[in-house]
Amino acid sequence: MNQIKVFCPGSVANVSCGFDVLGFCLEPVGDIMSVTKTVTPGVTIGTISGQDLPKDPEKNVASVAVKSLLEAHPSEYGFRIDIEKKIKPGSGIGSSAASAAGAVFAVNELIGRPYSRNELIQFAMAGETLASGAAHADNLAPVLLGGFTLVRSNKSLDIIKLPSPPKLVATVIHPKIELKTIHSRAILKNTIPLEKAVQQWGNLGAFISALYTNDYELLSRSMKDKVIEPYRAMLIPRFEEVKASAIQAGALGSGISGSGPSIFALSKSNEIAEQVGNAMKKQFDDLGLEYDVYISNINNEGIKILH
């Protein structure tokens, strides 16, 4: 095989109570990436459509991730990466993770699949570190593994794939403003009160239990962020109003998607998820702010080969 085309899906990280450890994979939004073997060794960036991204291999997260893979598994071939970038950088739905994960997945296929999807996370982390200034896998893991994932350790990459309750549907609204992860991390505190920490890990444990037991009411009670959301909320226009309108429309819970500015909600059916999306839209309509809305089942496959 000399060429491969893959769909690299978006993702929601943190999921309210799971800062830097919890995430899930989306279905309808993602990048298209084509990777082609070349005679000349090394990694090059070919065409990029949709967004203005660097073609310098040292500055593009896709090529940086692939270089990390090739350092561990050298190849006599080179690789050209062409990207249809449909996830806007700084959107909060895993733009850099989609690029990094998609690139290493594609090259891994072209060199005979020496690594499992789980093992590919370590190489994709190089691209994610370039993008956000921090090595974290909460977006990468669901993109590569599909569904919900829990990162027990970023250092050892001890990652667990979690079950997805069958009725769960996500609504994501992306106001068309850019909020870089590296900037939204900068406003966070290095210490948190013990009381808030206890509440947070209680919510995270209960949320994971709810995924295993399909307990939608417990899931709803657990979607509370006591640590990160209070700081990042101020960076997103009308965040509190959007969140409140989503819950009033029937959502189980709502929060900031990744580092923002996208806002996500989880609902118990497609019908409710659509109602939630309409309620969220009204808040940004009042501001005259443009947005995209995605209604998504939980994508349990992750990255998908198109051709």
Image (tube, rainbow, N blue to C red):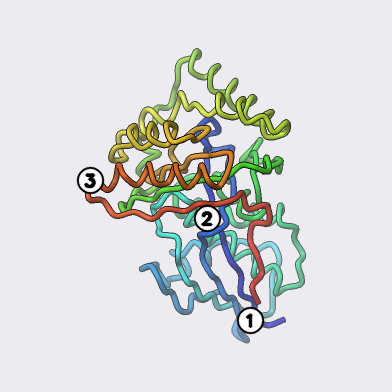
Q: Please state if 256 lies on the left or on the right of 69 as rendered.
A: left
Q: Amino acid at mark 3?
A: Leu
Quadrant position of the N terminus in the picture = bottom right
Amino acid beneath label 2: Gly
* Element assignment for label 2: strand
Give the mark, 2 or 1, whose residue is nearer the N terminus.
2
Question: Please, which residue is most extreme toward the bottom here?
Answer: 39
Question: Disc 1 designates what residue?
Answer: 37
Decide: marks 3, 1 in contact (CB < 8 A)?
no
* Label ID, residue 287: 3
Q: Residue at x 55, y 74 (%)?
A: 43
Pointer 2 with pointer 3, Cβ within 8 A: no
**Distance (Cα) linking label 2 and label 3:** 26 Å
Residue 170 vs 45, above or below: the answer is above
Q: Secondary structure at mark 1?
A: strand
**Picture disc at residue 10:** 2
Q: Pointer 2: residues within 10 angstroms few (<14), some, or many (20+)?
A: many
Query: Residue 78, how many percent across, how many down?
Result: 61, 79
Q: Is residue 135 visible?
A: no
**In terms of image quadrants, where is residue 102?**
bottom right
- Marks 1 and 2: in contact by CB < 8 Å? no
Q: CA distance from mark 3 to mark 1?
A: 48 Å
Q: Earlier in the sequence, mark 3 or mark 1?
A: 1
Residue type at tag 1: Lys
Q: Which comes sooner in the sequence, label 2 or label 3?
A: 2
What is the x, y in percent for residue 262? 40, 46
